[in-house]
Image (cartoon, rainbow, N blue to C red):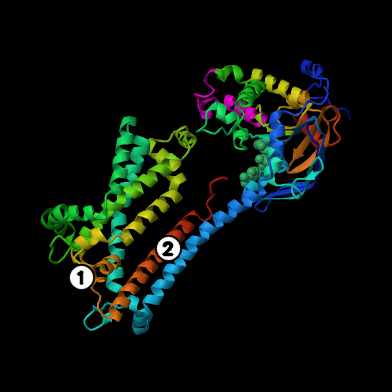
């Protein structure tokens, strides 16, 4: 059955003026490109080089781990893996355990995250979505400047400003309003877990917010437009068009902030009170893994003491790994089954 | 000069989805070949298999043989060499936002280390003229970012970028879908000029366009090549009922 053509196939005028000409000479561009090699060697060596870089990370991590294990063998032999769950810390009688330090480290770091993350997100959202253009650069610059201040300076500031505020104003206020929770009890000298957490929060705020800002700026404008055109308010646009697209990157930024909080030494040592005890009250003094190493390493007398401090380092190392693994798992659980970004 | 492309038993997957099934066809050298078919039938996927772009998607996989001239591109050449000889215009314009128009157009030459200023200038002018964009951008070639152009202008700039490397095969995935009738007809004229020297594969939803520019046309449906024949035959007397339904608009 003949088909009625939907379109007419007549040679257009352009068809007539192009009778096949004699083969065109090879252009200089093509000539040049044809002399280029396959790049296979370059690509393979580049890949090998990058692999070497990636492996060096493994090697460094394993090396650190090995050194830590080796140098803490005395304490490992004396207390076994129980070391990580024992509460004692008595250099005089040679009785050591890491639990108070692990508690202090986790409590201050997580508390700092709880305070810093919402603030950092707010700063980043303000900078990318709401801030008037002329103010953007100066504010971003200030945020980054905060990240560059050495931690001992933060520590000094905390000792002279934060501690009095905690002791005289914020502390009594917390006792009055939230005292019933049991988190704000006992003597409040201004130094302790809460003060350490606050200074940590201030210290990690700039890292998290400037990384988050960079991640959010990288979200293509067309994503924002797509959401706005559906009639979204500005906040809905930020939630769906920006935050949702950058969530994995934001988790990465938070993890970097947490890493800094876990390992922070100087500023924390200056305001945490340095007592290896576990208290529910956030006014109580505490101690962190990093602080105890910094404070006691130079004076560590006796091989077991020395070895126990190294094992504290091992504990810090493991805490960092476990915390990161847990965070990855959380990301995986949240994004599992959801479509990933198109490649 | 262009080279012919021989495709044998080409299969392609995205994850576990079998997107292209047993495609066999010969794309003759120095001719234009049009690919038509409903949306989502696998035209873009097929075109991407011709310069090994398909494999850049981490979940994608392809089997079968694709020969460019005498070379089996999946076994006898590196993807880099193949892509250097095959120009590609994507369905969605993808300018480099941090480069000027000038740098966008010659990016294929720059990355290969081509430095001759005079030839670079000439190439930019020639390719932009061929892509029918020269008049609109010649005054701010180096001032404006490639992303600051309108959608259709970006598409023409991407065509110019593909032409600048003087490819032997030109793959165009709906190059005119965002263009006005005047630019469209300029692009069609360009295909007319180029096809005496290059092998051109063009995906299009515009059947008049297929009829105007291409000697041969392939009709894809659900990942299969239903029919491949001379454009004249496809549009006047197709063998397959499904082709007939599609081109007469009785599809679906
Ligand atoms: N990146 C991808 N990941 C997963 N599946 C994909 C991807 N790209 C395409 N597909 C699937 O492969 C099939 C063929 O897609 P393709 O883009 O080749 O269609 P097309 O013929 O070019 O359509 P259109 O005319 O709309 O451009 C579709 O069903 C699509 O769902
Ligand atoms: Mg397509």
Relative to residue A156, is residue B159 drawn left or right?
right
Tell me residue A245's x, y (percent).
Answer: 46, 44
Tell me residue A214's x, y (percent).
Answer: 41, 43
Q: Is residue B52 magenta?
A: no
Tell me the residue that label 1 is attached to: A275
Relative to residue A52, is residue B21 drawn left or right?
right
Callout in the foreground (1, 2) = 1
Which contiguous range is marked in magenta? B139-163
Report the residue at 73% width, 25% height from top.
B191
Mark 2 crowdedness (10 Å alpha carbons): few <14, some 14-19, many ≥20: few
Is ligand 1 less than 8 Å from the beta carbon at label 2?
no
Q: Which mark is residue A326?
A: 2
> Which one is earlier in the sequence, the residue at label 1 or at label 2?
1
- Could you tell me how far apart the alpha carbons at marks 1 and 2 are, in whole angstroms? 28 Å
Residue B235's image quarter? Answer: top right
- The residue lying toward the viewer, choosing from A300 and B251, is A300
Question: Farthest residue toward the left?
Answer: A168
**Ligand 2 in which quarter:** top right
């Amino acid at each position: 059955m003949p088909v009625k053509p939907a379109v007419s196939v007549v040679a257009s005028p352009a068809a007539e003026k192009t009778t096949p000409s004699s083969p065109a000479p090879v252009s200089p561009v093509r000539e040049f490109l044809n002399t280029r090699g396959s790049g296979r060697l370059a690509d393979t060596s580049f890949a090998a080089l990058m692999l070497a870089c990636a492996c060096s990370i493994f090697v460094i991590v394993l090396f650190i781990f090995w050194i830590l294990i080796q140098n803490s063998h005395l304490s490992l032999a004396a207390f076994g893996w129980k070391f990580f769950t024992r509460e004692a810390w008595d250099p005089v009688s040679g009785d050591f355990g890491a639990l108070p330090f692990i508690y202090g480290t986790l409590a201050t770091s997580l508390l700092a995250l709880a305070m810093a993350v919402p603030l950092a997100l707010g700063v980043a959202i303000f900078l990318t979505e709401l801030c008037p253009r002329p103010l953007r650069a100066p504010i971003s610059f200030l945020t980054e400047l905060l990240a560059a201040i050495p931690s001992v300076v933060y520590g000094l500031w905390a000792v002279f400003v934060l501690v009095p505020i905690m002791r005289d104003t914020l502390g009594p206020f917390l006792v009055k309003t939230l005292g019933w929770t049991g988190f704000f009890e006992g003597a409040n000298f201004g130094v302790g877990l809460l003060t350490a957490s606050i200074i940590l929060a201030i210290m990690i705020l700039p890292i998290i917010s400037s990384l988050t800002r960079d991640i959010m700026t990288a979200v293509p404008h067309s994503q924002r437009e797509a959401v706005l055109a559906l009639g979204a308010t500005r906040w809905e646009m930020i939630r769906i068009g920006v935050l949702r697209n950058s969530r994995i990157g934001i988790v990465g930024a938070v993890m970097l902030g947490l890493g800094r909080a876990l390992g922070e030494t100087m500023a924390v040592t200056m305001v945490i009170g340095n007592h290896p005890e576990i208290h529910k009250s956030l006014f109580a003094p505490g101690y962190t893994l990093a602080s105890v190493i910094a404070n006691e390493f130079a004076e560590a007398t006796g091989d077991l003491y020395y070895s126990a401090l190294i094992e504290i380092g091992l504990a810090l190392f493991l805490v960092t790994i476990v915390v990161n693994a847990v965070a990855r798992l959380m990301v995986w659980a949240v994004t599992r089954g959801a479509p990933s970004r198109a490649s | 000069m262009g080279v012919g492309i021989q495709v044998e038993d080409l299969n392609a997957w995205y994850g576990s989805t079998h997107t292209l099934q047993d495609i066999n066809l010969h794309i003759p050298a120095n001719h234009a070949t049009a690919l038509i078919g409903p949306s989502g039938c696998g035209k873009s996927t097929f075109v991407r298999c011709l310069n090994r772009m398909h494999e850049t998607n981490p979940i994608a996989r392809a089997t079968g043989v694709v020969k460019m001239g005498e070379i089996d591109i999946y076994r006898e050449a590196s993807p880099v060499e193949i892509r250097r000889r095959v120009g590609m215009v994507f369905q969605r314009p993808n300018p480099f936002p941090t480069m000027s128009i000038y740098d966008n157009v010659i990016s294929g030459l720059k990355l290969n280390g081509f430095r001759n200023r005079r030839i670079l200038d000439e190439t930019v002018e020639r390719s932009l003229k061929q892509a029918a964009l020269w008049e609109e951008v010649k005054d701010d070639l180096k001032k404006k970012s490639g992303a600051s152009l309108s959608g259709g202008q970006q598409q023409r700039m991407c065509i110019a970028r593909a032409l600048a490397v003087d490819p032997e095969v030109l793959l165009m995935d709906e190059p005119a879908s965002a263009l006005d009738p005047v630019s469209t007809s300029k692009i069609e004229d360009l295909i007319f000029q180029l096809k005496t020297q290059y092998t051109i594969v063009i995906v299009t939803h515009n059947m008049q366009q297929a009829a105007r520019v291409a000697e041969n046309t392939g009709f894809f449906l659900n990942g299969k090549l239903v029919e491949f024949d001379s454009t004249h035959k496809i549009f006047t007397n197709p063998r397959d009922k499904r082709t007939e339904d599609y081109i007469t608009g009785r599809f679906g």
